[in-house]
Amino acid sequence: MGKCKFSLKWLDFKFNGISNSEWLSKVNDFNAYCSVCPCKIVVSRGYQAVQYHINTIKHQNNVSTKLSKSQQQINVVPVPDTLPLSATTPSVSSAANTLDGGVSSVIKNIKHPVSLELMCRTDAATRAEIVWALKVVTSNYSFRSCDITSVFKVMFPNVEVIEKMTMGKTKTRYFITHAIGPYFYQILIEDVTTGGLYYTLLYDETCNTENKKELQIDIRYWSTTQNKVIVSHLQTFFLGCAEAKVLKDSVLLAVNKANCHWRDY
């Protein structure tokens, strides 16, 4: 009886939702390699040998640990050509010395500048959720329109990123307020304070749709990074009452939080 050979179709098979391609690779026609154990698998008996390896306790424990969604992994990322080689080579070479021989040899043989980054399997889904949240802001979508994950799964079946997305109105609101909001706020403050120039505060106090007092504060300033006048939202306050002292304290609180210079004339 002749020997069986490695088939690339085996890489498409899944076990417990994990594709073989994430850990199985071809060495030659009669041998495969498991990257999580790590060990060589003789496949002369066909896929039965791979299946036997999958069912071992050692392999299942390694898969549950090393290929879990929260497990961080090292990825080799090409650096844009605009960056000089000297800016990345030292960090790559020093990191390569601390890795196992297999990964180290791969990095040392890369001719183009690269950098290393840690990421987990859910990073791609998180990036997709952030992009959607930004689209909601820039296009002024309602939060009710964000209960769309099930629609995406029908539109794009068998896409791993879509399968991991869990967007909804509550999560989108959280993303905007607590995740990406502080990031853009910090960019705004750095742009305002870097130039050390004058600025103007714009504020409006009114009743919102819930019949509650609301104070909106905007800031207008000359942006040295964009070389033009910018008007941007600074902070929102929800007030129990709108007395003059309350308005003054709220405005000063927004200014102090932004670390903007001001004088009490």
Image (cartoon, rainbow, N blue to C red):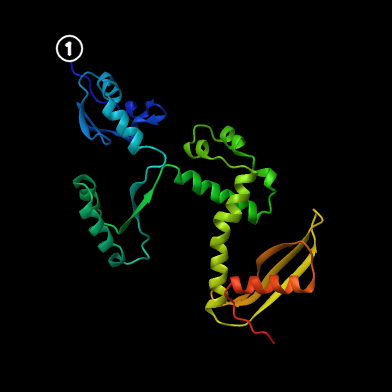
Vertical order, 122 against 182 (above or below): above
Q: Position of residue 77 (x, y in %)?
A: 35, 53
Q: Which residue is nearer to you in this view: 2 or 242?
A: 242
- Residue 109 in view: no
Quadrant for the C terminus, please: bottom right
Vertical order, 63 against 260 (above or below): above
Locate residue 42: give its quadrant: top left
Locate residue 186: give its quadrant: bottom right
**Which residue is under mark 1?**
1
Q: Position of residue 207 (x, y in %)?
A: 81, 60
How many badges with numbers are in the image?
A: 1
Vertical order, 2 against 141 (above or below): above
**Horizontal placement of 120 versus 113: left or right?**
right
The 10 Å Cα crowd at callout 1, few under 14, some 14 to 19, many 20 or more, is few
Tell me the residue at 60%/50% (across/down).
174
Q: Position of residue 69 (x, y in %)?
A: 42, 39
Locate residue 86: give its quadrant: bottom left
Q: Which residue is nearer to you in this view: 97 or 261?
A: 261
Q: What secondary structure is marked by label 1?
A: loop
**Horizontal placement of 138 versus 215: left or right?**
left
**Residue furthest to the top:** 1
Q: Amino acid at mark 1?
A: Met
- Residue 254 in view: yes
Q: Which residue is nearer to you in this view: 11 or 248?
A: 248
Q: Position of residue 136 (x, y in %)?
A: 64, 51
Vertical order, 50 against 190 (above or below): above
Tell me the residue at 17%/12% (across/down).
1
